[in-house]
Amino acid sequence: MRFWPSDAPGPERVSYRDFPGSTVPRSPFGFLMMFVRHRFAANVAGLALSAMAAMGLMGLEPVALRHLVEVLEGLDPQRGPDGAWPATLAPWLAALGGLWMASALFNRIYEWVDAHTSPRLRSAVQAYLFSYLMEHAPQYFHDNFAGRLGQKIKQAPESAMTLMSIAVHDMTRIWVILGIALGLLASSHLGFALLLLGWTALFLYTSVLFSRRCVILSRKLSDDMSAVSGRLVDSITNADLVRSFVGLVRERTLLAETLSSERNSSQSLRTFLILMRFMQYNATLLFQIILVGMAVNEAVAGRMRPGDFVMVFSLSNLVATNVWNLSNRLLDWFEHLGTLTEAIELIIRPHAIVDPPGARTLEVGEGAVEIEDLCFVHADGTPVFESLRLAIAGGEKVALVGPSGAGKSTLIRLLLRHYEPQGGSIRIDGQDIAGVTLDSLNHAIAEVPQVPGLFHRPIGENITYARPGASEEDLWSAASRADCHDFIMRRPAGYDTVVGERGVRLSGGERQRVAIARAFLKDAPILILDEATSSLDSETEHMIQQSLWRLMEGRTVIAVAHRLSTITGMDRVFYMEAGRIVEEGSHAALLRRNGPYARLWNRQVGGFLP
Ligand code: ATP
């Protein structure tokens, strides 16, 4: 049985921490340049050089043509039909053929380098974004659809690849051909060169003006496309809810609204691009007409030879074709620029909860927890704790009870540092959790929540997630102590049984037992039980309670419970109301006090005190 992936190196293992610099670039070009500088400098240089070489060689074609025409022009018109090809033609024919072949060769070299660059770039960008995303605080994942985040991580690398290809291939070619054309035209006639220069400046200026509007339209389209995926994923994940409330028509209506917004944005962008390309086409055509007109004028006036005319004509063709090709790729450019910008803005936000500078490793001995003057208000302004104080001795087992909204789960989240308090401190064995590394804090605490998270992977892998590399004996021992070994072995695939998304192929009780086995394997000194058995029937709850008592042995335990029958054996009970501890003591002591805890207990046991 092997549940752990091999340590294969490659772009797939890239983490955002592997890149130097304290801040992550938040502009698409900064982001791309970071990869180019630190990972793909040689590849991109190879791509750019081969694209430049291929274009440069093509740019010399008009020169060879000019010489060929000059040779043809000088031939004797009285030559007979048997006339062999004059030797003077050979060098220019050879040059022309050589240019074509060499240009084609550099194009193939470009493709070869690209085949070894783009897939690596795609993997590296995905791995980078994933590593950054996963370090966001839990609140971030509550605020953003998982489907949307996954989609962004898939889309961003495609966009990065397209942008890089347009920048390195199409744009490089344009600069090369403009440079060559400018040089050749200047050598032939200064007026032609000035025309090309003026036209290029005007063309670039208007293209930049157009592109601003394009960026706005493409961002809107990208937003709308994300809204559609968010809506789709929300409906699909709640397919059972939709069916049971006969809500398909409502879901379709909601989807139709977002789809229509996406359609409108797409139409606006495409219409604008058609207009833009129409203008660009006309501008290019005008340039060609003026240039050829000027050349004809020069030829008629006897200031230009046919060879030069052919060169000017084919140069104008080359410039026009390449400009036109680039404008055809502008739709891709702006769509992908919008997509990459949106992905970066969504994922590369500052992490809300990070290790403080100089964070130490949390050293846990007994596992005592002290909470002092804790103040906490949720991000939306909901106040929960004003000045909470609480002390739990090492190895003590306490329960947090109280009405809904009292702040029990929030307190647990604060202990796990899912949220940062606005004031006060939480200390474990005297060390403020705000000053220790998040990893060491997470190592010290095991949690069995009401709905345990499970990966769509084998059960064995789900359990050993708590301790990578655990032996088979450790796995079986943890599973046996959590009462799940038998039900796992009854499955045909045993520990290799794949549990389905979020563990849907297991019953609620089985899922809970897998979570307990995982906590056994983690063997953390502090254990949190957050309504661990509240979704189970009484009989299953009773059985799981036995496993839980075994798990609690020798650990500090904080249990949140609504069903008070599950916590009567705890050392102390804290009764909370509106963020305050109203009562504390053992179950028996609180019953004797006859306060709010006793009233809650009475209601749960049907009005009879034991
Ligand atoms: P229950 O027993 O129903 O789970 P609880 O005692 O665990 O309740 P909490 O979940 O801690 O209560 O909630 C305390 C208060 O904080 C409630 O008023 C709740 O509405 C609010 N709250 C909880 N989570 C958030 C959040 N992410 N953003 C804003 N307010 C929140």
Image (cartoon, rainbow, N blue to C red):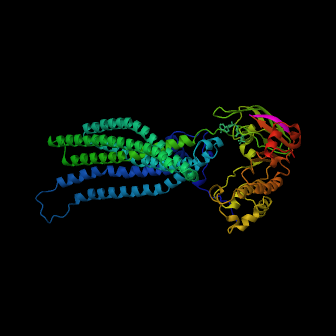
> Relative to 282, is 578 on the left or the right?
right
Write the residue at 35% across / 45% down: 327
Q: Where's residue 346, x and y in %?
A: 55, 41
Q: Seen from this angle, which residue lies furthest front?
A: 607
Q: Can you see residue 468?
A: no
Q: Quadrant of ligand 1?
A: top right
Q: Where's residue 218, x and y in %?
A: 43, 41
When the figure is inspected, residue 491 is found, relative to residue 330, above or below; the finding is below
Q: How many numbered circles does the render carry? A: 0
Q: Where's residue 74, x and y in %?
A: 17, 53
> Relative to 23, is 67 on the left or the right?
left
Q: Nearer the viewer, residue 133 or 491?
A: 491
* Image quarter hosting the N terminus: bottom right
Q: Nearer the viewer, residue 335 or 47?
A: 335
Residue 593 placement: quadrant: top right
Q: Nearer the viewer, residue 594 or 381?
A: 594
Residue 391 placement: quadrant: top right
Q: Seen from this angle, which residue lies furthest bottom?
A: 492
> Relative to 343, is 85 on the left or the right?
left
> Relative to 548, is 234 on the left or the right?
left
Query: Is 388 contained in the magenta span?
Result: no
Q: Can you see residue 141?
A: yes
When the figure is inspected, residue 476 is found, relative to residue 42, above or below; the finding is below
Query: Majority secondary structure of the magenta segment?
Result: strand
Q: What is the span of residues highlighted in magenta in the rendered image?
A: 578-584
Q: Nearer the viewer, residue 50 or 535?
A: 535
Q: Where's residue 564, x and y in %?
A: 80, 46
